[in-house]
């Protein structure tokens, strides 16, 4: 039999237990109210966020994080582009698949098993549509297609409808390619087995690959989008066999390329472009080209998106700065309502268990007017 005393004790015990649970819960809450670069980042269901090579759209008080869904065994797209939403950039609700790959055998450009990377979404005020661009490689063709893919939705979380994929700016010369380089005779086939020589670098600089791809359109791989203050949008992508970045203007509805584009750093081998504008200056952080392995970030700045772009040194400072803290850039997010506050977003890839890739988010600090990145074990965007 349980006597009154023991019931009372049990009551007190249960109360104390409940209280300690509460403290623990709040500790966990507070603990989780932090961004912890490189750690597992659970969503509202407790599962590690699966939105790699991602980017963020801010709309009506909500952040929407879009990224590549990665499976455990392959980096190819088996599901599509995921979307998560948040109001504080720390707690993320899984909104499911925003753009779904098409069934196997459908012959669609975005058939299951294609490579669908680095999706970014921007909102278009004229059409009231959400516009997603991504890097697309056709199923079974490795990285040879090098296309930009387009999908559109009436709602931020989707579903997005796949519209088209192509190599941008077919039949159009870059604005900053001198007339005399447009008619040069050197051909890519002249340099087979003779890459990385001084002569090869010169012909790359002079637009050898732009001429090679002139009719079919320019290669478009690692990419980001940027909407400027005047609402003009730009698609920034690694082109020319990943040797040269292109910055291409998008049409007013953001759903096609206008044909106005520039090349920057021909032969510079930049990937993973991420861009932001701070006090009238455009800053871009990129990586070098070492596949899934991290390398040293690069930084560029320009007074206009059309250049001229100037290279500055690696923005990372401290231990592992030369490997971008073991990560590769994907996006730079201006924090809503906070002047001069930007988050550098990067991926720490895990090619042998792609779904376990980690997110390296760090606040951008400024020193002498230039962005710098320092490692932080944990931090809160509100602090
Ligand atoms: C990286 C690129 C990734 C992915 C990978 C494949 O350099 O940034 O998006 O394409 O190569 O090896």
Image (tube, rainbow, N blue to C red):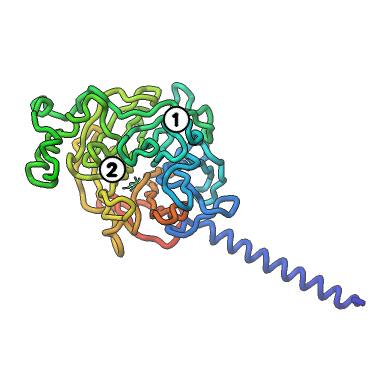
Q: Nearer the viewer, residue 370 or 261?
A: 261
Q: Which mark is residue 108?
A: 1
Q: Nearer the viewer, residue 135 or 330?
A: 135
Q: Secondary structure at mark 1?
A: loop
Q: Position of residue 358 (x, y in %)?
A: 43, 55
Q: In terms of image quadrants, where is residue 308?
A: top left
Q: In terms of image quadrants, where is residue 143?
A: top left
Q: In terms of image quadrants, where is residue 203?
A: top left
Which marked residue is nearer to the observer: mark 1 or mark 2?
Answer: 1
The answer to whether residue 337 is visible is no
Q: Position of residue 263 (x, y in %)?
A: 21, 34
Q: Residue at the location (12% across, 26% down)? A: 182
Q: Position of residue 252 (x, y in %)?
A: 37, 22
Q: Position of residue 361 (x, y in %)?
A: 41, 53
Q: Furthest residue to the right?
A: 1
Q: Is mark 2 within 8 Å of ligand 1?
A: no
The answer to whether residue 261 is visible is yes
> Viewed as shown, does residue 4 lie left or right of 303?
right
Task: Look at mark 2 in the image and give the residue it sits on.
Answer: 283
Q: Residue at the location (12% across, 40% down)? A: 191
Mark 2: few/some/many CA within 10 Å (<14, 14-19, 20+): many
């Amino acid at each position: 039999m349980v006597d009154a005393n023991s019931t009372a004790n049990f009551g007190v015990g249960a109360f104390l237990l409940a209280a300690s649970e509460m403290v623990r819960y709040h500790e966990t809450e507070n603990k989780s109210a932090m961004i912890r670069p490189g750690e597992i980042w659970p969503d509202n269901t407790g599962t590690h966020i699966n939105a790699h090579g991602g980017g963020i759209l801010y709309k009506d008080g909500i952040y929407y994080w879009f990224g590549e869904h990665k499976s455990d065994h392959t980096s190819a797209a088996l599901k599509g582009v995921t979307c998560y939403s948040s109001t504080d950039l720390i707690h993320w609700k899984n909104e499911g698949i925003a753009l779904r790959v098409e069934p196997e055998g459908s012959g669609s450009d975005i058939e299951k098993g294609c490579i669908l990377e680095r999706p970014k979404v921007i909102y278009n005020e004229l059409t009231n549509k959400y516009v997603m661009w991504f890097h697309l490689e056709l199923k079974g063709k490795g990285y040879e297609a090098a296309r930009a893919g387009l999908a559109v939705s009436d709602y931020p979380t989707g579903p997005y409808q796949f519209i088209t994929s192509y190599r941008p700016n077919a039949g159009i010369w870059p604005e900053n390619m001198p007339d005399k380089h447009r008619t040069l005779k050197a051909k890519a086939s002249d340099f087979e087995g003779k890459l990385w020589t001084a002569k090869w670098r010169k012909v790359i600089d002079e637009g050898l690959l732009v001429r090679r791809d002139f009719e079919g359109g320019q290669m478009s791989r690692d990419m980001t989008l940027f909407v400027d203050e005047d609402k003009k949008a730009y698609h920034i992508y690694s082109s020319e066999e990943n040797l040269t970045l292109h910055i291409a203007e998008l049409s007013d509805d953001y759903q096609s390329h206008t044909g106005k584009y520039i090349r920057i750093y021909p032969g510079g081998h930049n990937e993973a472009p991420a861009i932001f504008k701070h006090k009238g200056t455009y800053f871009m952080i990129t990586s070098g080209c070492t596949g899934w392995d991290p390398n040293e970030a690069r930084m560029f700045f320009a007074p206009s998106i059309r250049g001229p772009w100037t290279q500055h040194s690696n923005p990372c400072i401290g231990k592992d700065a030369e490997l971008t803290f073991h990560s590769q850039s994907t996006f730079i997010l201006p924090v809503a309502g906070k002047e001069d506050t930007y988050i550098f977003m990067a991926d720490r890839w895990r090619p042998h268990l792609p779904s376990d890739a980690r997110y390296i988010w760090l606040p951008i600090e400024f020193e002498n007017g230039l962005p710098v990145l320092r490692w932080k074990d944990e931090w809160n965007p509100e602090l």
